[in-house]
Amino acid sequence: MSERMTEVTDAAQADKPGPGKTFDARMVFFLGLLLAGSGLVSPPVALVGGIAFGFTVVHPYRREASSLAKLLLQLSVILLGFGMNLNQVVHAGKSGFLYTAVSICAAVVLGLLLGKVLKVGGKASFLITLGTAICGGSAIAALAPITEANEEEISISMGTVFLLNSVALLLFPAVGWWLHLSQNQFGLWAALAIHDTSSVVGACVKYGGQALAIGTTVKLARALWIVPVSLVTAAYMGKTAGGSQARAKVKVPWFIFLFLGASVLSTYLPRFMGAYVDLNKLGKAGLTATLFLIGTSLSKKTLQAVGIKPFLQGVILWIVVGTVSLVAIYTGVISI
C-alpha cells in the first residue's frame, strides 16, 4: 500500500481510541506481528489475522505498518532468492517476459474499455487498469504522481486492488489443488493473474517450492514493466498537460536486482548452502509478517472508500485476466 493511501485512511479514521483501547490495540498488534514472523502460522492465516485486526480495532500504527510492510516485502523477496537456482530463474524469466508483455497489453486495452463502458471517472480507471495489468499497489504508487491523481482516485484504486489481492491469496491455492495444477502451472498462473508481489509469493509459498520459484521470477519480470510504462505515461502526460508531470521520478524496483544477486550466490557458491537455507527461511517468515501488516491496513473505512463502479471494473478485469490465463495454462497453450 502506498503512503498516500495511508494518509487518506488516517484522515478517514479521525475518531481516536481512549488510552486503554490504544494500549490493548498496540499489544494485540505487536503480538500478532511476532506470531506471524515466528514461522508458526501460514501466510493465509497471517493475512486473515491481520484483516480481523483491521476490522475490529482502530489501527494504532497505520502509517508505520504501511512503511514497514513495503520494506519488509522487498527484503523478504531478496532473501527468497537464496533458495533459487539462477538457471531456473533465467529460464522462467525468458518465458515470463513474453507472457507478461502479452498479458499486460491485453489487460490495458480491456481495462480502459471497461472504464469507459462503466463510466469510471477521473484517473481511477487508468490506475485500476495498470494496477491489475502490472503489479497492483506498486504500479499505482509509481503512476499516481505522474498522472497527478488526487487522493480519492488513489484511495479507490488501492482499495480495489487490495481487496482482490486478499481474495486471490486464499482462492488461488484452492483452485490450483482442485484442478491438480502442477507446480510450474500454478506458479505461472499466480504470477500472471495476481496483482501484488506479496500475494503472488504468499499463494505460491502455500502451494510449493517449485511454484514459488516460478511465480516469483515471472512476477518480478512482470513488475519490471513499471519502468517503461511509467516513462511512456510521463511523456504522454507531459505533452498533454504542459510538461509538469514529465518531471516525476520513476522508481526502479531495486530489490529485483538484489533478488537476482542472491540467486547467483546460491547457484555458484554452494559451499555456503547452510547459510542460504537459513536466509531463505528468514525470507519466508518475513513474507508472512508482511501479509499480516498488509491485512491490518484493510478496514471498514477502506471498503466504504471503494465505489461500486471502480470496484466492478477491477473485479471484471481481474476475472477475465485470471480465467483466460488459467485456461491457456491448463490447456498447455503457454507453459514454463
Image (spheres, rainbow, N blue to C red):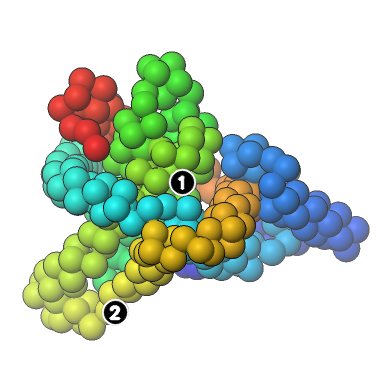
Above or below for 87 versus 172: below
Q: Nearer the viewer, residue 49 or 297?
A: 49
Q: Tell me what residue is drawn at x 46 percent, y 60 percent.
A: 270
Question: Disc 2 marks which residue?
Answer: 249
Q: Measure how far apart labels 2 and 1 are at the Cα level.
A: 27 Å
Asked if 103 appears above or below 270 in the picture, the reply is: above
Q: Counting residues from the N terminus, which is met first, the one under dot 2 or under dot 1?
A: 1
Place of residue 129 in the rendered image (x, y in percent of width and height, measured from the top left): 26, 48
Residue at point 13%, 80% (across, down):
242
Question: Which is closer to the viewer, label 2 or label 1?
Answer: 1
Along the viewing direction, whichever of 200 and 160 lies nearer the viewer: 200
Say whether residue 117 is visible: yes
Question: Could you tell me which residue is drawn at 75 percent across and 55 percent down?
Answer: 34
- Residue 206, percent across and down? 53, 35
On the picture, is 60 further left or further right than 167? right
Judged left or right of residue 175, residue 41 is right
Q: Which residue is mark 1?
A: 201
Question: Callout 2, which amino acid?
Answer: Lys
- Crowding around mark 1 (Cα neighbors within 10 Å: few <14, some 14 to 19, many 20+) is many
Look at the numbered disc 1 and give the secondary structure of its residue. helix
Q: Secondary structure at mark 2?
A: loop
Q: Is residue 256 visible?
A: no
Q: Quadrant of residue 64?
A: bottom right
251 or 244, nearer to the observer: 251
Q: Is 228 left, or right, of 284 in this rendering? A: left
As shown in the figure, which amino acid type bears the numbered disc 1?
Val
Q: Residue furthest left?
A: 239
Q: In terms of image quadrants, where is residue 192?
A: top left
- The image shows residue 244, relative to residue 189, as above or below, that is below
Whole-percent x, y for residue 119 in the image: 23, 42
Say which quadrant the C terminus sits in: top left
What residue is rendered at 38% in x and 53% in y? Answer: 85
